[in-house]
Image (cartoon, grey):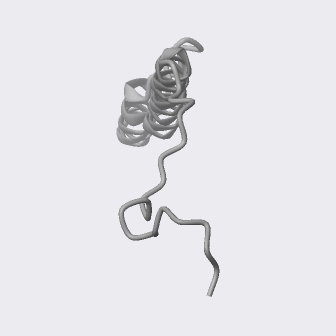
Amino acid sequence: MRTFFATAMAIAMLAGPAHAFDMTPDSKDPLQLKYEREEQEKKDIERDYNAQMKRLKAQAPTTTKKDPWAGVRSTSSEKR
């Protein structure tokens, strides 16, 4: 009787941790959650970047050329 009780207790003690481990298929491990969060952050950054580029393209570019050396150059067409 004592061996039967000891065997039953050993099986019960081993079954406790196995039962505590969640084996449902819809649960995700922490590493998988981390990868999904990083993927979502990458998508958010890409979406924000594309929106910013779209706003910059919508702004009218300046078509006039500016000459930063215009004040330094002489107005005469003489060449030395």
Q: Position of residue 3 (x, y in %)?
A: 42, 42
Query: Is 25 drawn above or below residue 63 in the view shown?
Result: above
Viewer-side residue, 63 vs 14: 63
Q: Residue at x 37, y 30 (%)?
A: 16
Q: Position of residue 56 (x, y in %)?
A: 48, 24
Q: Residue at x 53, y 26 (%)?
A: 61
Viewer-side residue, 39 vs 70: 70
Identify the image quadrant of the N terminus.
top left
| 78 relative position to 76: left or right | right
Query: Is 14 drawn above or below residue 55 in the view shown?
Result: below
Count of numbered circles in the view: 0
Viewer-side residue, 55 vs 70: 70
Q: Residue at x 36, y 37 (%)?
A: 13
Q: Position of residue 39 (x, y in %)?
A: 54, 31
Viewer-side residue, 77 vs 65: 77
Q: Position of residue 32 (x, y in %)?
A: 53, 33
Query: Is 27 drawn above or below residue 42 in the view shown?
Result: above
Identify the image quadrant of the C terminus.
bottom right
